[in-house]
Amino acid sequence: MGKRSIREDKNIFFESREQAGLTRAQASELLGGISDSSLEKMETGKTSIYPEDVVAMARAYKKPELCNYYCTHECAIGRTSVPEVKLSSLSEIVLGMLSSLNSLENQKNRLIDITADGIVSDDELADFAEIQKNLEQIDTTVESLKLWVANTIAEGKLDKEKLEALKRK
């Protein structure tokens, strides 16, 4: 392996390559189609990074979270519509999901009352905002679970083909 960089202002793509134990030359080979010099420019912020490059890096570095990072930090659409998620343990994700679902269960009848007439009035707005907040929390925990699965597959601890076959049943 080549020498490690002493740069302090490393971006996530630079850090992920180093954590994977790869030199730029080795990463360039794995990424196929991205030259050493292009990779260096992406890692130092001298050039924009494209989604397909991030997908290739996520796969090569076994860091699926790079895709979520890109969507929530680099992509103009993703910054407003994709929830940022952090790697969490399965138990944390499941407990968070259950907590959100329980809250929503308690608010279900209120949501029906609010939306029955197709209008959210001023006196219903605070309750509607709280329900929306719970729905966003559910969305975030779903995305966290997807990231956990992708990471577990990348680590070789979960068989992707078996999982997909079981989901299709």
Image: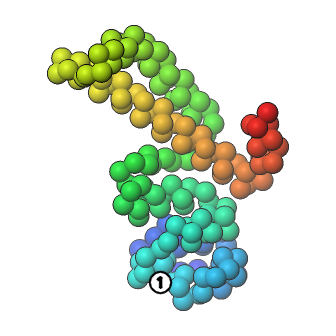
Is residue 123 placed above or below 72 in the rendered structure?
Answer: above
In the displayed structure image, the side of residue 52 where residue 80 appears, left or right: left
Residue ranking furthest to the front: 117
Is residue 76 placed above or below 102 in the rendered structure?
Answer: below
Q: What residue sits 44% from the left and 46% below the top? A: 83
Q: Amino acid at mark 1?
A: Lys
Dot 1 alpha-carbon crowd within 10 angstroms: few under 14, some 14 to 19, many 20 or more: some
Where is mark 1, residue-wise?
41
* Residue 135 image point, x, y percent: 42, 30
Is residue 3 placed above or below 11 in the rendered structure?
Answer: below
The answer to which of 14 and 135 lies nearer the viewer is 135
Is residue 71 placed above or below 115 in the rendered structure?
Answer: below
Q: Quadrant of residue 134?
A: top left
Residue ranking furthest to the bottom: 37
In the displayed structure image, the side of residue 150 where residue 144 appears, left or right: left
Camera sees residue 19: no
* Residue 106 image point, x, y percent: 43, 12
* Residue 139 image point, x, y percent: 48, 36
* Residue 4 image point, x, y percent: 58, 80
Quadrant where the C terminus is found in the figure: top right
